[in-house]
Amino acid sequence: MKDCNKNEEDDPYRPSAPVSTGTLPRWARKHHHVQQHHQNHHHHSHAVEFDDNDAVPSAPPLNLMDQVSGYESVSFDAVSVPPPEDPPPATPGEEDAAGPSGAGDGGGGGDGGGPMGGDPMGGPQASGVARWGHTLSEQEARAALVAHVKRRCCYGASAARNMAITALDHASALQYTLETFTERRETAWSFSPYLGDEVDGSDNGPAPLPWELDVRPSQSFASEVKCQPVPHTSSVKQCHRCKGSGSILCADCHGKGWVHCISCHGNGYDTDASGYKERCFYCHSSIHGRGRQDCSKCSAKGKMACPTCEGGGLLLCFIQLTVTWRVNVSEHIVDRMSVPEDLVRNVTGAVAFVEEGARVLPIAHFPDETVNMASAQLLRDHEHDFSTQRILAQRHQVQVIPVTGATYKWKSSKGEFYVYGNEQKVYAPDYPQTCCCGCTIL
């Protein structure tokens, strides 16, 4: 199993993206001046030459790939494969025979009351939501504000210590969260250098379809990607980059094995201020003559091992299956005070309801009807958005986050601040004692 998240070595020759047409660009032309140079030096090179301005093929021609039953439309671009239709839901009798499914009537096990059952808040009155959790006293609200101010370099602390808190209003923000754990499968032709290993081709049997392969996530509700070759789809092809030669011309010296000396500018001699000439120190020992430095990139050979096939001249081509598991999260926040949703999202509260299962049903009897409506809407959205993927599991919960609003008066200023979450974070948008950076307030 290949780790799809593993970073490959940087390779200046490696193409940035595959092609799916199989069209060969102008990349295998022989140039007269390089051929003449090779003839003058009485040797022949089988390295493939390419012009820097020409496109380098990034994949073998698609029309050379084997035809595999069930994968006729596969190209070098990954294409998502919809899952087969899920089996019809089991009847209640079959569910009982299969074993307990956990709390709730929605077919999912988990903690908390069932979505269609009793009040998950433990009582029939919606007013129970507003007073869920600990109620802050005036001293606790002030202490939270003082701690908040001390963390701000440009806030004065005297206002927080001396202001008159005239009223406290206790309420709760509600955070409904839906998580859907999905699986997506994609197929595409892929290739790697052929190093002489056994080839799992069509002689070993028909290739299984993408959703017939047993590939499972390492854990539930965790994003992950796995890649593996589809069995019985492998074949060996000639390398499209080097045309099977195993080598390519060096891009620095263009196959010559040398570059012009940057010290003497190709003259072969250095001249001092008095006009005295001496052999250039940097190129005097070059095997290619004066004014020329041996190419360091190819060790003066003029060619390099093909990076695509790693010098072997052959590629192992196969259909690769990529399986992606993802946790898709949607949420809805109900806040009847003025605390921004982004702040409410980053604190915790009491979990009033939680359920997990293969599929969950909308919450129906939560005391706040807004939560019931949000649950139904988000479940519909997930069913639609992930229709081309397989839904493996779902879970949803309602978190009740305590919020205390404090009305205060300090000197001639009046305003409000809010203490929210179990962490007792503070939101004070109109705090009366602030200043510009660099000032100090005593």
Image (cartoon, helix red, strand yellow):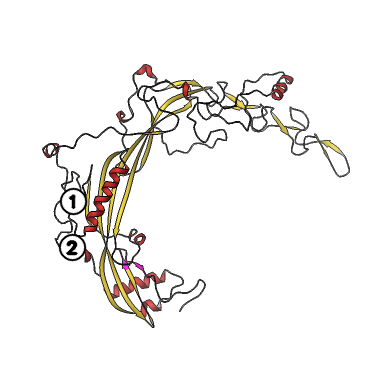
Within the magenta stretch, is there residue 317?
Answer: no
Quarter in which the C terminus is drawn? bottom left
Residue 176 lies, in percent from the top left, at 27, 55
Q: Which residues are magenta?
A: 419-429
Q: Nearer the viewer, residue 229 or 373?
A: 373
Q: Would you say residue 136 is visible in this rendering?
A: no
Q: Which residue is mark 2?
A: 126
Percent position (x, y) of residue 101? 16, 43
From the viewer's perspective, tell me whether residue 240 is left or right of residue 207: right
**On the picture, is 391 further left or further right than 312?**
left
- Image height check: is 223 above or below 228? below
Report crowding for label 1: few under 14, some 14 to 19, many 20 or more residues within 10 A (C-alpha).
many
Seen in the picture, residue 164 relative to 211 is either above or below; the reply is below
Location of the N terminus by quadrant is: top left
Residue 338: percent from left, percent from top:
33, 67
- For the residue marked with disc 1, what is the amino acid? Pro
Structural distance between the alpha carbons of marks 2 and 1: 16 Å
Residue 286 quadrant: top right
Which residue shows up at 23% across the image and 67% down it?
134
Q: Residue at x 32, y 43 (%)?
A: 385
Query: Which residue of the protein is positioned furthest toward the top in this rendering?
Result: 203
Q: Secondary structure at mark 1?
A: loop
Q: Which mark is residue 115?
A: 1
Find residue 348 and name its label. Answer: none
Q: Amino acid at mark 2?
A: Ala
Asked if residue 424 lies in the magenta stretch, the reply is yes
Q: Earlier in the sequence, mark 2 or mark 1?
A: 1
Query: Is 424 situated above or below 396?
Result: below
From the viewer's perspective, tell me whether residue 58 is left or right of residue 135. right
- Residue 399 in view of the camera: yes
Report whether 285 appears left or right of 222: right
